[in-house]
């Protein structure tokens, strides 16, 4: 089983990364620098404009260390990848299945079933743990509606039908999402999902987590030899990692939504850490972003028993595990793709 490594997050805008021997050197304008052994890293994510040296890029590609560039505000810019991993026959099979709707639908349905089931878990946990603080009838009704959608998804014959169910489920889920925010309601509330730009603090936090998760899933897919840009549920578009978006659907409630709610409800982040820009979008400041990244890494270190493998693994290896299971299915080693159902 793959081991969970460390991820280096560069949040200082003026920082520049170089390579000295087997060491990553983080240089800043004031002359200070930080040194980290390259062999301890699984990935580097830069929230800066200056970037990295070509020598470090090459070293990362040779050692399969993920290197991702985001703007200081968290918008995806680029990923640096080395040689394609895995067997070419696996990718040819992936392309073949993606062009055949009859073969794509069962995989896409699995992604969607797990997503909706995991959304229900988020709601049901709120009902179980905070019945005195939430609108129990509204949440119970939403959970029942999502359960009803789960029963009809296996009957779908086209990806168009699945996307329609996905849209309906998302509306039901996000309609009651504000009920899951228990504290700091004056600063953190949720009316509807807004993106590019996010128009409130909660949407800003969710969008940030979704970017991090997309990068982790794309890296996991590349690591097992799959093409993250050729999916089964999301339509292929230039520059869009469709398969990464497919796979992250089942993980979003577990990784992003639940963690965002925890940070707010436990008052680990504050509303003053967010600011509105001229465009109307909401962005978090440097201090808040660092707190969020620490929480993200701590979450990935937590362990759980994988529902299919029945093995205890860190949360951070779930994207890799699911990517590996998907590859095994495409190779014919499994009768069906086993999605991640959170307990």
Image (spheres, grey):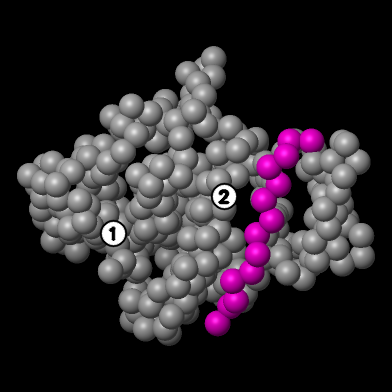
The image's mark for residue 174 is none
User: Residue at 58% across / 78% down in the picture?
Assistant: 2
Q: How many marks?
A: 2
Residue 7 shown in magenta: yes
Mark 1 closeness class: few <14, some 14–19, many ≥20 residues within 10 Å: many
Which residue matches tag 2? Answer: 293
Q: Position of residue 121 (x, y in %)?
A: 24, 59
* Screen quadrant of the C terminus: bottom left
User: Residue at 87% across / 36% down in the picture?
Assistant: 29
Horizontally, is 214 left or right of 265 in the view? Answer: right
Q: Position of residue 41 (x, y in %)?
A: 71, 65
| Magenta region, residue range | 1-14
User: Residue at 60% across / 44% down in the picture?
Assistant: 290
In whole angstroms, how far apart are the C-alphas of marks 2 and 1?
Answer: 23 Å
Q: Earlier in the sequence, mark 2 or mark 1?
A: 1
Against 83, residue 209 (above or below) is: above
The image's mark for residue 118 is 1
The secondary element bearing badge 1 is classed as helix
Residue 239 at least partly seen: no
């Amino acid at each position: 089983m793959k081991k969970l490594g460390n991820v280096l997050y560069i949040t200082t805008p003026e920082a520049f990364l170089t390579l000295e021997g087997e060491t990553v050197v983080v240089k800043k304008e004031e002359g200070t620098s930080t040194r980290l052994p390259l062999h301890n890293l699984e990935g580097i994510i830069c929230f800066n404009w200056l970037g990295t040296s070509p020598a470090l890029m090459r070293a990362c590609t040779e050692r399969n260390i993920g290197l991702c560039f985001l703007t200081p505000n968290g918008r995806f810019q680029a990923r640096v990848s080395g040689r394609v991993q895995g067997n070419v026959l696996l990718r040819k099979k992936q392309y073949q299945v993606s062009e055949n709707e009859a073969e794509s639908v069962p995989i896409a349905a699995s992604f969607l079933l797990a997503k909706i089931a995991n959304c229900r878990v988020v709601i049901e946990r709120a009902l179980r743990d905070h019945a005195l603080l939430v609108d129990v009838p509204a949440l119970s009704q939403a959970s029942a509606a999502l359960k009803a959608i789960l029963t009809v998804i296996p009957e779908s014959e086209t990806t168009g039908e699945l996307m329609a169910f996905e849209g309906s489920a998302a509306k039901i889920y996000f309609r009651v999402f504000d009920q899951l925010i228990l504290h700091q309601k004056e600063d953190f509330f949720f009316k509807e999902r807004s993106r590019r730009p996010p128009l409130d603090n909660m949407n800003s936090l969710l969008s940030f987590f979704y970017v991090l998760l997309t990068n982790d899933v794309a890296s996991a897919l590349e690591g097992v030899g799959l093409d993250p840009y050729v999916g089964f549920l999301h339509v292929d578009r230039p520059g869009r990692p469709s398969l990464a978006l497919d796979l992250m659907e089942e993980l979003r409630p577990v990784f992003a939504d639940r963690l965002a709610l925890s940070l707010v409800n436990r008052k680990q982040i504050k509303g003053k850490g967010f600011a509105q820009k001229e465009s109307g979008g909401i962005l978090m400041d440097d201090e808040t972003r660092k707190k969020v990244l620490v929480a993200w890494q701590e979450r990935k270190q937590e362990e759980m028993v994988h529902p299919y493998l029945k093995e205890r693994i860190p949360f951070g290896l779930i994207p890799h595990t699911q990517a590996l299971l998907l590859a095994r299915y495409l190779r014919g080693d499994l009768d069906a793709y086993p999605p991640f159902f959170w307990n």
